[in-house]
Amino acid sequence: MRKPCCDKEGTNKGAWSKQEDQKLIDYIRAHGEGCWRSLPKAAGLDRCGKSCRLRWINYLRPDIKRGNFGQDEEDLIIKLHALLGNRWSLIAGRLPGRTDNEVKNYWNSHIRRKLISMGIDPNNHRLNQIPLRPPPKSDVSASATSSESTNNECKPSQPLKSSVNKTTDRVSDSLDLNLDLTIAFPSPPANSAEGKRRLSKTMMAKQVGSSEPVPTLLLF
DNA sequence: AAAACGAGCAACCGCGTGTTA
DNA sequence: ATAACACGCGGTTGCTCGTTT
């Protein structure tokens, strides 16, 4: 039913050349973002539209801030992750100049490791009990959260629902994580199927725990 | 000096969702 | 109402480069 996003034959893959970058930049400067499917042809690129989009968003966009993450950014990522889980695009949306891919990579390569070394479960931001023991079978939620030993460990799953509302032994509490917050969404792009999409996704995320008091995050 | 290893990052893939015809 | 399309997201892969042995 679903066709591949582009015909795989005849499209380049792998690292982008300078010429390809320049073509993409020139085209988007002239015509703006969007219509990714038709863009490659129009721009003279032998690339899949998805690949063009990714390259632009993660690397070529002029407002991208490159380089190391600051301590404030790292703290913010940790706090947002405690609330939102692996919703990298939402998290990146609160970090000007950072992309979801960059945030995700930074989390996986730095923050995650750091939290683990501190004895903190990066998936639910709780202190691990030492020694780590497999949870009792009857405790479903516990088994879902002690995920270091499972294959589903990175499921964004219920960070909103489970991690936010239970405050006992939450490390984030000791890290001065102010959970009495309200999520302030960045204003969606004006042209914006994306804005609408993001908003609706976010609303869904908020509604996950709608039967319970939803903690709010006032960030800006 | 060279091989082995690990970390970091760019890019790809598959799926979910909103839109359109 | 629904199938096809277009896009965005999150997970994963694989390459590159620095460090260790």
Image (tube, coloured by chain):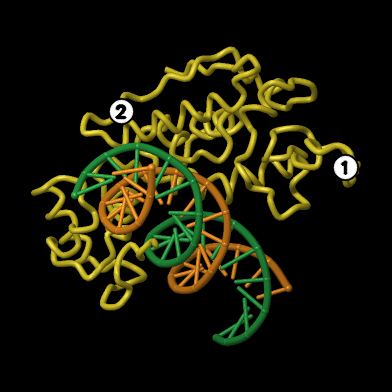
Chain colours: A yellow, B green, C orange
Q: Residue A71: x percent and y percent? A: 53, 32
Q: Residues within 10 Å of mark 2 (few under 14, many from 20)?
A: some
The residue under the point 28% across, 36% down is A193
The residue carrying mark 1 is A135
Please report contact status of discs 1 and 2: CB closer than 8 Å, yes or no: no
The type of residue carrying mark 2 is: Pro
The residue under the point 50% across, 15% down is A182
Q: Residue A10: x percent and y percent? A: 26, 77
In the rendered image, the residue lying farthest to the left is A30
Q: Chain of mark 1?
A: A
Q: Earlier in the sequence, mark 1 or mark 2?
A: 1
The residue under the point 63% across, 45% down is A155
**Which numbered marker is on residue A188?**
2
The residue under the point 59% across, 28% down is A208
- Quarter occupied by the N terminus of chain A: bottom left
The type of residue carrying mark 1 is: Pro
> Is B8 placed above or below C16 here?
above
> Is A177 placed above or below B9 here?
above
- Quarter occupied by the C terminus of chain A: top left
